[in-house]
Amino acid sequence: MKLPHLLLLGFLSFICQASAQKIIELQSIPTPPDIKWDRPERQYFSQIWQTDVVTNVSKPTLTAYLPDPSIANGTALIIAPGGGFMAHSINSEGIWVADWAVKHGIAAFVLKYRLAPTGEDATAEFVQAVGDRENFLKRVGPIITLAIADGNAAIEYVRSHAAEFGVKTDRIGIIGFSAGGAVVGGTVYEHTAASRPDFAAPIYSALRQADTSPVPPDAMPLFIAVASDDVFGFQKQSTEMFTKWNTAGKPAELHIYEKGGHGFGMRKQNLPSDEWIEAFGAWLKSHGWLNQ
């Protein structure tokens, strides 16, 4: 007899959660006139990647997911999905991470940074393009600069609107996956006081190989995770970044999982990499970022 009442409560809960989302248009550096998008932004299911993707992002946005005020802890997490700068893997590297964050009292913001213009199926184009590294970098290189600027703009926006979102200006972090991890790396090395992340988590990150940039004097704590069987070899860049931070006496934690491949995100594969999100939560807790 109580079933209709429970269904109503569940429906109302869904409505409340949906209404808590807010899409924010970011003001970032302008797009050069030679980069043009012929197709509108689009979300669809990629048969190649077996997940939902967003493509042809020409204007950067944040989608806010806010926790219940009763559990909110004042920490904010900006989430940058991966996808080779040609798509956003929006679920396992975006929305599902935001869901986890909200359940732990964190205000989450999924960042859609600008992507390279693509056609009908960006994931098919990526598979074809990535085999030719030189031409691929020529295609996405100008976009990387824009994407990093979008990451900085996201941090700056959340910090300047901290009171509105119920977060503290010194508890704003960023996490990114693969190409999104390169956005994280860009904000770590290149930031102002307003756009500096208080903590950063590059996950199987497409960091710049053999990066000789010095550790910034205001280096923030890092959480790094990758699988040793990453097909793109990003375990090397991850290890190098950890070593640089560790050598400089800066706080950093590195997890290299024996199995997990590339792009594991929040997907459950019954592999060691499934545990990364619990390790990330424990790391946040150790720094006090889960405390109310």
Image (cartoon, rainbow, N blue to C red):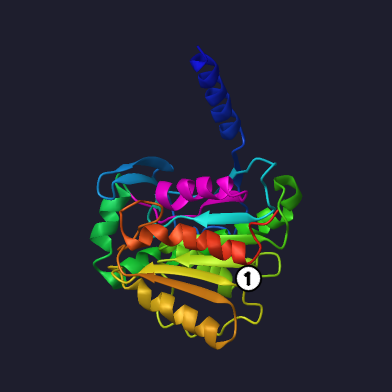
118 in relation to 4, above or below: below
Amino acid type shown at disc 1:
His
- The location of residue 33, given as percent across then percent down, is 49, 58
Q: Quadrant of residue 204?
A: bottom left
Q: Nearer the viewer, residue 98 or 139?
A: 98
The answer to whether residue 232 is visible is yes
Mark 1: secondary structure: loop
Residue 281 horizontal side relative to residue 91, left or right: right
The answer to whether residue 152 is visible is no
Q: Nearer the viewer, residue 87 or 159?
A: 159
Residue that appears at 55% across and 85% down: 214
Which class describes the residues within 10 Å of circle 1: few (<14), some (14-19), or many (20+)? Answer: some
Q: Is residue 113 inside the magenta stretch?
A: yes
Q: Quadrant of residue 188?
A: bottom right
Residue that appears at 57% across and 55% down: 78
Farthest-out residue, top? 1
Q: Which residue is mark 1?
A: 191
Residue that appears at 62% across and 77% down: 219
Farthest-out residue, right? 163
Q: Nearer the viewer, residue 74 or 174?
A: 74
Q: Is residue 275 inside the magenta stretch?
A: no
Residue that appears at 52% across and 15% down: 2
- The location of residue 260, given as percent across then percent down, is 31, 62
Specify start and end residues of the magenta stretch as a single range: 91-118
